[in-house]
Amino acid sequence: LSEVDFGPIDFYVPGVISLLLQHIAITLAALAIVRERVGGSIELFRAAPVTSFQTLLGKTISFMIFGGVLAAVLTILVILLLHVPMLGSWAWYVVVILALLYTSLGMGFAISSISQTDSQAVQYSMIVLLASIFFSGFFIALHRLLTGVHIVSWLLPATYGTAMLQDVMLRGVPPETTLLLGLILFGILLYTFAWWRLNRLMARE
């Protein structure tokens, strides 16, 4: 239908992009708060006229810029070196990438707010990565999973990112509205939890 020949590797590229961006974003954010808590920077935040919301916002902006640059480099390599087709709109591609990074950072901040040490935060991040490999549709198609397992799948940002990037890159259609809104709503919930936890930490310590 698209008059484009797809190779086996083309179907894995959207999943690889989602997994890499999710893992890097979660790992960076997971180490952000816990390191400052262990290092004593939280005390400086308490003394400074900075709220927990402003702290999260500043970290989010910096990590989003870093993630955006990384996504751009990764996309260029995929398109130029692997010759993966890009049949859809670049605008929708950017929207999906930003939503994926936003929600992944929210999950990382949530992990960081409940972690006590750096190693614990990294372990939680690795658990999310392993779950994403097997339950996000990257390794095993979602329709082959048991119905109850789908709950785990839709708690992973990579699941949304993989499905939407396949639509944009390989099918040339906009991402499903329910998936995009679901991913953004999931990110808002994660950020709300991280903000609540950070607010309590800054008030208590």
Image (cartoon, rainbow, N blue to C red):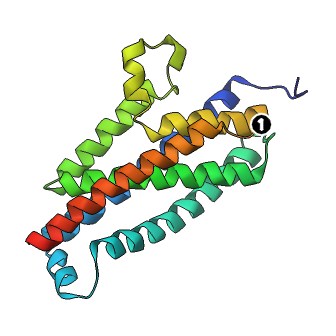
Q: Measured from the top left, where is residue 8 in percent x and y?
A: 69, 23
Q: Dot 1: what SS?
A: loop
The image shows residue 76, relative to residue 125, as above or below, that is below
The image shows residue 35, relative to residue 93, as above or below, that is below
Q: Measured from the top left, where is residue 159 in percent x and y?
A: 50, 33
In the image, 71: left or right of 5? left
Q: Measured from the top left, where is residue 70 in percent x and y?
A: 56, 59
In the image, 205: left or right of 114? left
Q: Is residue 27 visible?
A: no
* Furthest-left residue in this view: 205
Q: Measured from the top left, where is residue 49 in percent x and y?
A: 26, 88
Find residue 195 and report its image quarter. Answer: bottom left
In the image, 26: left or right of 172? left
Q: How many numbered discs sit on the rendered protein?
A: 1
Q: Residue at x 60, y 32 (%)?
A: 163
Find residue 171 and report its image quarter. Answer: top right
Q: Residue at x 57, y 61 (%)?
A: 68
What type is the residue that disc 1 sits on?
Val
The image shows residue 152, relative to residue 182, as above or below, that is above
* Furthest-bottom residue in this view: 48
Please give the residue where the numbered disc 1 appears in the rendered image.
173
Q: Check disc 1: other Cα within 10 Å, few if <14, some if 14-19, many if 20+.
A: some
The image shows residue 27, relative to residue 159, as above or below, that is below
Q: Residue at x 59, y 51 (%)?
A: 97
> Which sits in the foreground, 124 or 73?
124
Say which quadrant the C terminus sits in: bottom left
Say which quadrant the N terminus sits in: top right
In the image, 65: left or right of 54? right
Q: Is residue 128 visible?
A: yes
Q: Residue at x 55, y 51 (%)?
A: 99
